[in-house]
Image: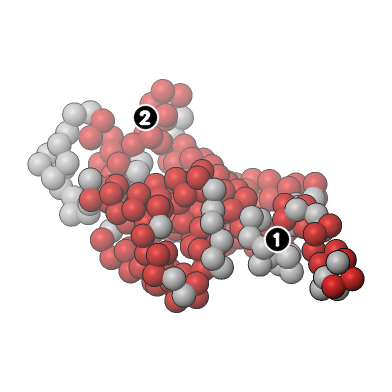
Amino acid sequence: STAELPKNYAVSSSSPSRSDDRETLSSWSWLLIVALFAAAMLLQQRLQLNLDVSWLLVAGERVLDGGRLYVDIVEINPPMAVFAYLPAIALARATGLDSAVVTDGLVLTLAAVSLLAAYRILRLSAKLDHVRLSFLALWAVAVVAILPMNVFAQREHIALLTFLPALAVYSLRSNRETPPIWAILVAGVGAAMTLAFKPYFAVPAVMCVAFAVARSRSWRVLFSPENLITGGLVTI
């Protein structure tokens, strides 16, 4: 009978869905986020281009002109170090803009897409009811867009941005929560791009997976789809 049900049964069964419980970003939060990205772009125009980024743009120019990496172009880093900047170089050639400016714009775009994906993934968790996502979002934008300063658009910076969705998925896995298919695909591809920059970038990825396994107390997290996608792409 109804009288024999637990006292909190009626409350839990009539509570809104998890997506309704989550804090959403207000209009002011979105405006502040846009302002932070605009400030980051203006800041980069005042700072000198990082020497490593400058060289990799030169190497990318030579690759697009037909040069062979490691044969005609002296380079000791994995191919991803140069390939990551080819879209900016190609877009700069097509538009007539400076490749450094286009690089800054594309990295900021990547930051926005990565943070938005991580935000949407984290909102799926039932463990974040108490977290002020608006404050977290503003802080995250400041950290990835403004804090890098003179190392903006470095390989490590780009690798961090591509890894953020995977970090959010690992967070869900650690809570024994299953992310949606789109999140799994984004996490797997993003983590693979991160690991392709430098082999030892696998260390933080392995640590995150190990933490998720330990916290969820399930070895099955090791063989989650995003890890299989990452492993397959990195192998290729």
The colouring scheme, among rainbow, by chain, secondary structure or one colour, is secondary structure
Question: Residue, x 29% and y 47% (percent of image)?
Answer: 233
In terms of depth relative to the viewer, which is nearer, 145 or 23? Answer: 23
Which amino acid type is shown beneath numbered disc 1?
Leu
In terms of depth relative to the viewer, which is nearer, 186 or 8? Answer: 8
Q: Return the x and y of residue 151 as percentages of the image width and height.
A: 43, 58
Whichever of labels 2 and 1 marks the residue nearer the N terminus, that label is 2
Local SS, label 1: helix
How would you rate the neighbour count of disc 1 (Cα within 10 Å): few for under 14, some for 14-19, many for 20 or more?
some
Quadrant showing the N terminus: bottom right
Instruction: Indicate left or right for 6 with 70 as reference.
Output: right
Q: Return the x and y of residue 12 as percentages of the image width and height.
A: 80, 63
Q: Residue furthest right?
A: 3
Question: Residue, x 12% and y 39% (percent of image)?
Answer: 72
Q: What residue is shown with label 2?
A: 90
Q: Nearer the viewer, mark 2 or mark 1?
A: 1
The quadrant holding residue 63 is: top left
Quadrant showing the C terminus: top left
Q: Return the x and y of residue 197 as percentages of the image width and height.
A: 30, 54
Question: Residue, x 40% and y 57% (percent of image)?
Answer: 224
In terms of depth relative to the viewer, which is nearer, 173 or 145? Answer: 173
Number of on-image labels: 2
- Do the numbered discs 2 and 1 sit on residues whose CB atoms are within 8 Å? no
Instruction: Indicate left or right for 41 with 229 as reference.
Output: right
Instruction: Indicate left or right for 126 with 217 as reference.
Output: right
Which amino acid type is shown beneath numbered disc 2?
Ala
**Is residue 204 shown to the viewer in this render?**
no
Q: What residue is shown with label 1?
A: 133
In terms of depth relative to the viewer, which is nearer, 96 or 9? Answer: 9
| Tag shown at residue 67 | none
